[in-house]
Image (cartoon, coloured by chain):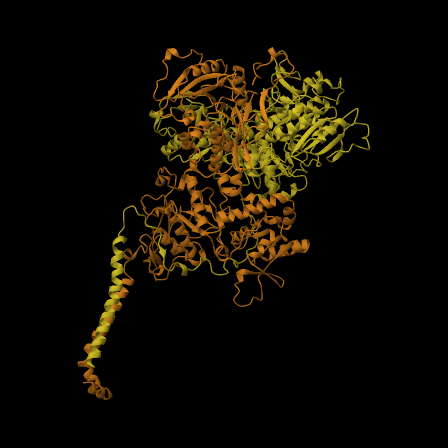
Amino acid sequence: MCASVKYNSRGPALIPRMKTKHRIYYVTLFSIVLLGLIATGMFQFWPHSIESSGDWSVEKRSVRDVPVVRLPADSPVPERGDLSCRMHTCFDVYRCGFNPKNKIKVYIYPLKKYVGEAGVPVSGTISREYNELLTAISDSDYYTDDITRACLFVPSIDLLNQNSLRVKETAQALAQLSRWDRGTNHLLFNMLPGGPPDYNTALDVPRDRALLAGGGFSTWTYRQGYDVSIPVYSPLSAEVDLPEKGPGPRRYFLLSSQVALHPEYREDLAALQARHGEAVLVLDKCSNLSEGVPAARKRCHEHQAFDYPQVLQEATFCMVLRGARLGQAVLSDVLRAGCVPVIIADSYVLPFSEVLDWKRASVVVPEEKMSDVYSILQSIPRRQIEEMQRQARWFWEAYFQSIKAIALATLQIINDRIYPYAAISYEDWNDPPAVKRGSVSDPLFLPLIPPQSQGFTAIVLTYDRVESLFRVITEVSKVPSLSKLLVVWNNQNKNPPEDSLWPKIRVPLKVVRTAENKLSNRFFPYDEIETEAVLAIDDDIIMLTSDELQFGYEVWREFPDRLVGYPGRLHLWDHEMNKWKYESEWTNEVSMVLTGAAFYHKYFNYLYTYKMPGDIKNWVDAHMNCEDIAMNFLVANVTGKAVIKVTPRKKFKCPECTAIDGLSLDQTHMVERSECINKFASVFGTMPLKVVEHRADPVLYKDDFPEKLKSFPNIGSL
Amino acid sequence: MQLWRRKSLWLALSVSWLLILLRVFPVLRLAEPARRQAGAPQSWPRWLDAELLQSFSQPGELLEDGPQPPQAPRAGSCTRGACFDTSRCRGGGLKVFVYPAVGPISETRRKVLTSIEGSRYHTASAAEACLLVLVLSPDTPPGECHPALPQWAGGKNHLVLGLHPAPCLRIFQLGQAMVAEASPTVDTFRPGFDVALPLLSEAHPLRGGALGRLQQHSPIPGVALIAVAGERGGWYTAGTNFSACPWDGRCEQDHGPKQTHPGVTLPNATFCLIPGRSPDAVHFLQALQAGCIPVLLSPRWELPFSEVIDWTKAAVVADERLPLQVLAALQEMPLTRVLALRQQAQFLWDAYFSSVEKVIHTTLEIIQDRISGASAHPSLLWNSPPGALWALSTFSTSPSDFPFYHLQQGSRPLGRFSALIWVGTPGQPPLKLIQAVAGAQHCAQILVLWSSKKPPPPRWPETAVPLTVLDGHGKASDRFLPYSAISTDAILSLDAHSSLSTSEVDFAFMVWQSFPERMVGFLTWSHFWDEAQGRWGYTGERANEFSMVLTSAAFYHRYYHTLFTHSLPKALRTLADESPPCVDVLMNFLIAAVTKLPPIKVPYGPWHQEARPPPLAPGGPRLGAEPQPAAQDCISQMAAGFGHMPLVSSRLRLDPVLFKDPVSVLRKKYRSLEKP
């Protein structure tokens, strides 16, 4: 057989024989291979729902395989954008419903490839940046995959660059989206709007009521409070590593790095350079670049070449001039270099101008003032320039540096419009982290002296010292401005004395029984507290006179945002132990007043109960100690202000006691209190207590003046 | 042969099957979990070829877009750059000329004219001005809207101001003029060019103003949560648990316990619901004055001064289509935010809206800010007390240079002070005082303001700190000029006849560092209402309270020199020059008006008073002096000038912690405060 094949293979008679014998063999062989190939191919292109979730939750597949949608030539085109749109006219807020988390829900349409009737694609399927943008939204808290629950819809049709799409067909593609509905609640992202020759400042694609997040809006096309002005992303942000350079004077005062400028601007720049010499550097394209160097990374001045964007770090101010478009990617590079942008583009709506305060990071100069720009910049004080440099870099880090940052800032702005009562504040948007850390906003910032007529509520925390309690009640009730007395009965095993046994006083007396013997009960914001001023007083503080208490209340009225109290204490840094130490000696300084006898605003009860940082509240209840120190930390931390110690009084419990307030002064007590200070300082992450050297006395205290004419004569004993 | 053929056949078979199996198995394995679980969100796919995607812009496209010529302003639309020629304001800054009124003049218009004329930007010459203001009256008949104005020039650099909705604004040929209009509609308002004014009532006071009604920081328990602006300027309050849409009339029956307040009474509630129609804008100011947080339901009008005021801090702008959500959000709003909104609403009322004068001055200040570009007020200065009218941007644009913003900035005032000693007649160099002050721990320099006719001595004693002699001109208000020689935040203002010990200076400066926005002084006066004569009076007698400290020995921030010189009306400063004790009163008025707080008193040794030289020559020593009868009247005149009595009384003195305590003197840091 072998021989015959060999033989036959040489002769022309071979082919007929192949037909009979080998054909079956080859056909089988080929069909098997073909089958294999087909099977392989089939699974390659199997519908993706099966192959989805490469690592169980995330889909992995190719952009080339997305379904193709053919748009008929006569499919509807949306209306042009409606310039009168506002949130309350064009936005369907009902779709956002009420969400307890005050977050809008954003749906992203699945990716499709749109082709015209002739099969020509409408645009490139998706760009890298738009893919990043959609990924960022999808990874955020805003995302929902449930189209019925969504409040905002983001098409996956890539509109970032108008030059890479066909306007009419793209509009048709938008119109056929399943929830389009005239574009209501649809958000479109575009960075490069318009096209030659007239370069519109907003996307030319008809979009009806859709919101547009656009780079390069002018005031004529921007719908205030409806559209969002976004930056033009600079791809150099990801490509080049440019470490932060601290603020301060730099080699060039003013620099221009843009290459495509109108000749008129070039002339102006050349004139500036001629007038101010070295301080001004005007760069242009390099004419003789060697092979392989991307033009985007080099700039030249005459024959000197500079690396871009590194050269921006050599200048204090950098020009951002209008080009064909108002929005320029150079703005992002300039901010990143910590160079203060000088924006010369009349009517340009700056990125995120709805929330960002550009005055703090840039100088906007009208186009007709371009020749004066140098003197305008020169008049800015140095400190302000440094502030602007820092602010510029912070804007870039927070809102420009990645597509994700741009996308999330855009959604946050829209979210804030829909849930204004949960909106992010000016400070959150604009203050760099260093400023946020250092700054304190006093919750009671309005200078206001509350009327004396309102009086105060005394709160006595008690367990079972009834006799001493009654004495305190009797003493406190003599204070003219007392308006109510609240006894917090912290003993669950014993009932408070019967009504008839309580001292008869001129103001209402209420007893509150607590569910658990906890120290924090004294700081609970009880509904019974109707006055703003609260006097916290222990049930054994029997020595405070009525004059002292009344004066304390008067002092509180002048400092309603502070703790105003009688027993003063101090914290000290122990250099040997390298930690904080509690001090109860009679020193020249004060940083705390104990809430065994102190006036404060009732708002701090709310803060103590609901906003105490970390586990301090539980820690205090568990240790049955230091609630007063915790209150001092809390108030000092939110107000940034020191306590006020009133009157010379230093002994509170009994005249014969040598100890300051009868609290045991033994070593363990002091160690525990010091521990509290160290614990709280670590939870707060800082030492908020402020040390002062003054206390408040009546104006005529110890003055040579008739005692009977003094308002508070009974003050002065220790 | 057969063998290899079979072998190759087998090989092919098994290879194909292997291929198939390899392909199928993972798919089978994947297929199951890929079935969509309820609740697991389907996220945006991670494309396998994401790395290969093209960038949105072609290489070089971001650089090389076709250059565009600078655009000319479009017809009919104006921005600051296009229609306002700031170069006319170069040099002297903003200069405002106002067209005088012709014929009979309405009360409101008179207030506006007076306010503009009282502004520090006012000029009487139209040629010198860079902003020309035309005040429209609501009662001008439409036929006479366009008076012939010689300087009109198409409206360039003009501001057409209508404090009340004027029919003229609708038909007026505005040209390139800016419009300052009460509650302009959102659609016609040109941000950054026009100015939105508040809608004031006819009776709005000229100056001083109706005080805010907020008496305490937190809402008073038991007061209604929500008041709703009703028809004809009234308000009605409703219980906390009404749950319907009370503003559109559809749920009339659900109002619950309802109280109607006739007339313009102020609402007494935590939140004030204000519908979005333009006439309702008048409710907005009522709410601010009452310290009631305005809740604006889809306002169709631009909020007043929205260019500079951050209304999100003081008001809630809500969507009128979501009444239930709005109510729920208000009910659940955290106390912290309620407090902040309440206080901010009240602060804004006091700072910008409480009088016609403040509204007008704020308008001019906004335009001045536009002109000054980078040296405009930062947002913080507009939006936190005391407000931009009291924080002059000509002093600094850096908030930490002012005494008011150290907390927000996390900064502190400079830890040293400059002593400024005023020497009047008879012109004795205060050698003892100089030594006492120079010995103070934190003294940075001593400035002697020589205001005597006698020439200053050629030689001064050697001191530990530099001593500079400044030339005074003999006017009492000279001592408050912003001398550039002052290099520290704190100033210790002294008279040649003041007597202070080093210890007193040290302690007072420690106190001042805790209260940099206030005056910290040693000697006090107090003001009182003289019932018999129906006017204000003041006394230097010792009393249980005080409201002024004497500037002959007081610490305060150097910013107050700038404020005193540049923001006070000239008439008041002239008054002070004529009667020297009035300078003290004026400075105290000024600081109290800014801070709304009393000054601070620190202990002052009684032995100084004994050593005080007797009788007082005019312009001479005033230490602890009883104000002279001639000067008594200036407090009334100043109260009139300010429009109200800004002074606040205090009943306390700040002493060292161990002051006069019966403990060993060795323990005490400021022991010489008790005995000389």
Residue B407 or B126: which is nearer the viewer?
B407
Viewer can see residue B145: no
Q: What count of labels does the image hold?
A: 0
Viewer can see residue B500: yes
* Residue at the image point whose x is 57% and y is 17% from the top: A717
Residue B643 or B412: which is nearer the viewer?
B412
| Quarter occupied by the C terminus of chain B | top right
Residue A21 quadrant: bottom left
Residue B508: image x %, image y %? 64, 27
Query: Is residue A46 depicted above or below A682 in this figure?
Result: below
Q: Colour of chain B?
A: yellow
Judged left or right of residue B491, residue A163 is left
Residue B16: image x %, image y %? 24, 69
Q: Colour of chain A?
A: orange
Judged left or right of residue B316, residue B486 is right
Residue A222: image x %, image y %? 48, 46
| Quarter occupied by the N terminus of chain B | bottom left
Residue B554: image x %, image y %? 67, 26
Residue B519 quadrant: top right
Query: Is residue A301 depicted above or below A637 in this figure?
Result: below
Q: Residue furthest left?
A: A20
Query: Is residue A213 depicted above or below A120 in this figure?
Result: above
Q: Residue furthest front?
A: A667
Residue A132 or A625: which is nearer the viewer?
A625
